[in-house]
Amino acid sequence: MKVLIGTRNPDKLAEIVRILGEIPGISWVTFRELPFPEVEEDGRTLEENAEKKARHLARLTGLATLAEDSGLEVAALGGAPGVRSARFAGEGRNFQANNEKLLALMKGEWDRRARFRAVAALALPDGRLWLREGALEGAIASEARGRGGFGYDPVFVPEGEARTLAEMAPEEKDRISHRRRALERLRPVLFALARGEPPPPGGDPGSA
Ligand code: IMP
């Protein structure tokens, strides 16, 4: 069974492939083998965007499609940047501009609680859909540290850690990440589909 990984973000793609690894009976297809267009992320929630990307690409390609939407929610900012995490400092700005904006807004703020959230969606061309969520609790650092990972990793310190995610080895981040948690919850669905067994509940046909 072929499963398309519906992201054109190379950092995310690398993490998804690393986390899911080999699943017997599944061969991953990426934008490198099957270049697909960007899907506009105009939903109000991570759930809406993950569902939209997965359904759209499954219909377009005829392949089972796994998509993911993720973001950083900062308590003192009322949950921002949230679904707008990628464009926090403006359309076309980069990770560094986003981090600088976040650190500036958080200057002098004592409540530094934050959480990464990921919603993974698996859609089949017949309209069935599974959504699974994962979160990682932590805090916003006082300055950017580390060179690993991507996005907000240099400014995010996971709960119980002193280092930022960007100071950890990729495998260390993968063990605890929001992405890992969401994808592990999707794994039983992928296993069952690959074996031709009845998949766990949640395969809502929706309005395909
Ligand atoms: P999207 O899911 O493609 O809309 O983008 C998610 C955005 O959230 C990324 O561009 C990052 O800014 C941020 N983000 C999501 N997951 C992570 C992560 O694991 N580390 C750091 N930033 C992340």
Image (cartoon, rainbow, N blue to C red):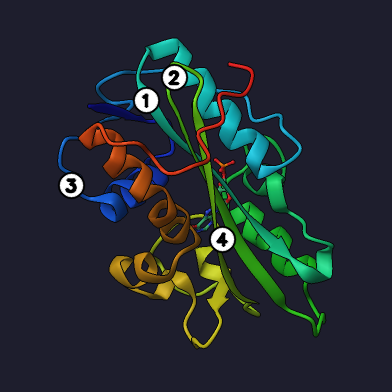
- Element type at mark 3: loop
Of callouts 2 and 1, which one flags the residue occurring earlier in the amino acid sequence?
2
Q: Does the residue labelled 4 lie within 8 Å of ligand 1?
A: yes
Q: What residue type is labelled 1?
A: Ala
Q: Which amino acid does label 4 sit on?
A: Tyr
Position of 178 relative to 20 (above/below): below
Of callouts 1 and 3, which one flags the residue occurring earlier in the amino acid sequence?
3
- Check contact, mark 2 vs mark 3: CB within 8 A: no
What quarter of the picture does the C terminus occupy?
A: top right
Which residue is labeled 1 in the image?
Answer: 64
Name which residue lies at 15% across and 42% down: 24
- Element type at mark 1: strand
Q: How far apart, in angstroms, are the residues tagged by discs 4 and 2?
A: 29 Å
Q: In this view, does 108 lie to the left or right of 168?
A: right
Position of 71 relative to 195 (above/below): below
- Disc number lying in front (4 or 3): 3
- Check contact, mark 2 vs mark 1: CB within 8 A: yes
Residue 1 visible in the displayed image: yes
Residue 88 visible in the displayed image: no
Q: How far apart, in angstroms, are the residues tagged by discs 1 and 3?
A: 16 Å
Q: In this view, does 114 lie to the left or right of 208?
A: right
Q: Is residue 62 left or right of residue 83?
A: left
Of callouts 4 and 1, which one flags the residue occurring earlier in the amino acid sequence?
1
Q: Residue 58 carries which label?
A: 2
- Element type at mark 2: helix
Of callouts 4 and 2, which one flags the residue occurring earlier in the amino acid sequence?
2
Q: What residue type is labelled 3?
A: Glu
Q: Residue 22 carries which label?
A: 3
Which residue is labeled 4 in the image?
Answer: 152
Q: How far apart, in angstroms, are the residues tagged by discs 2 and 1?
A: 6 Å
Residue 128 screen position, x and y as percent? 49, 26
